[in-house]
Amino acid sequence: MTLVIATTVELALVTTVLLLLLATPLAWWLARSRSAWKEVAGALSALPLVLPPTVIGFYVLVALGPASPLMALLRPFGVTSLAFTFTGLVIGSIFYSLPFAVQPLRTAFEGVGVPPLDLAATMGRGSLDRFATVALPLARRGFVSAGILVFAHTVGEFGVVLMIGGAIPGRTEVLSTRIYSLVESLQFGAAHVIAGGLTAFAFVTLLGLLLVERRLGGVRP
Amino acid sequence: MIEASFHGQLSRDFALDVAFEVPATGVTALLGESGSGKTSVLRAIAGLDRRDGSLTVGDAVWQGAGVFVPPHRRRVGYVPQAGGLLPHLTVSENLDYAARRAGAGRFHRADIVARTGLAALLDRKPGTLSGGEAQRASVARALLGQPRLLLMDEPLSALDTAARGGMLDLLETLFADTQVPVFYVTHDAAEAARLAARTIRLDRGRIVTI
């Protein structure tokens, strides 16, 4: 059980860190760009909200499997398949939780507005400097929300991790897929313990999110 | 001298077409009603909006054929209508924010803080300041950026009558003492007459009189 918890937490942490790094420039572009293409990109990034997890899991599984063009590119580096690996789980989780990072960050960046960034420009600050010293601190509530949501969402995901990881004990099995295995083998008592734990975790996470948002509410412009 | 020319269709029913030449000293008021193009001219001078045209400040070409100096390299001090202090920083940190990139210059922090009456407000966040206090901090911040040009966009319009009077007195003294060329946007002819050495009157994107 300890290994399953460790795999779940590790997956959630790695996904959260990588996704915040990847989603930040995308959300910034979506918030600031006047391009006609930005809503297309916005809709694409929000697709996981409405797609069945098995659809995402299926496509990612095909893309990470040995017959995919992506793996053909990685074969010279000794990588033949990422399906049923922890790396594969992380990649799938990043796609699945993408909107949970992009949406709060985009909203937070839009809330920063143009005037503070313009004023920073008149104070000798270049674009990267303005981003780091104005946009990031003013959007910090969005980062906290995105981080909490992505972490919690990754802990709770089932369809994608089952499709890509195969719930291999000791390698890709996480708490949500362990519940499924336990129920299949009629071990309802053990399933209750994990399900109850995840329910408590979800409640504490959402409560924490609301409290943090309320606490940081005062710094909004 | 400051030579400027800006033109272009800003929206479907508003075109900007201005050209002027004013001395690089004293206060130049940009006077006009709402929608006359005052703020558009000010933003073009700051480089915040890129318009067709040209701009020379003294011997520096900020905009011309193949040249566009971005706003962060122009060294302007900008005071917007409602102060525009960065809300996540204290007053003191706002002043430091402008001063850090500008380095040392003719405006010294202690002197500017004293003249703008900010000494007791340095640790306060912008959200706790009155309109007049925020505007004084904004003026101080603009000066500590050691500007070559000071740009003020209706700095008194958000203030009540009492705060307006105090702010007018402060600006009059500062303008007289600091010798930084100022472009001062206002819709109030009396305010322009009191503060400015010359007035450019705008109407629907064009200059009516200088």
Image (spheres, coloured by chain):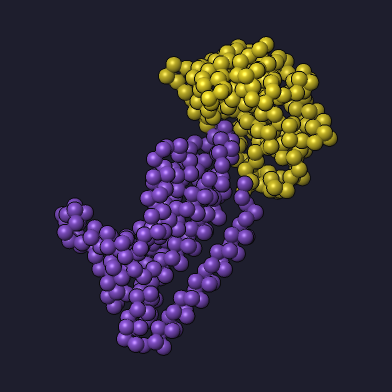
Chain colours: A purple, B yellow
Task: Identify the residue at image location x=71%, y=31%.
Answer: B155
A156 versus A44 height, above or below: below
Task: Identify the residue at image location x=69%, y=37%.
Answer: B82
How many discs mark residues in the rendered view?
0
Q: Can you give x and y, in whole percent of width and height, for residue A17 in the image?
A: 41, 59
- Any part of residue B2 in sight: no
Q: Can you give x and y, in whole percent of width and height, for residue A163 in the image?
A: 28, 68
Task: Identify the residue at image location x=51%, y=76%.
Answer: A200
Which is nearer the eye, A18 or A102?
A: A102
Q: Is residue B62 left or right of residue A16?
A: right
Please tell me in which quadrant of the rendered image residue A141 appears: bottom right
Q: Can you give x and y, in whole percent of width and height, for residue B30 in the image?
A: 67, 20
Outermost residue toward the right?
A: B162
- Any part of residue A173 in sight: yes
Please tell me in which quadrant of the rendered image residue A92 appears: bottom left
Task: Identify the residue at image location x=19%, y=60%.
Answer: A79
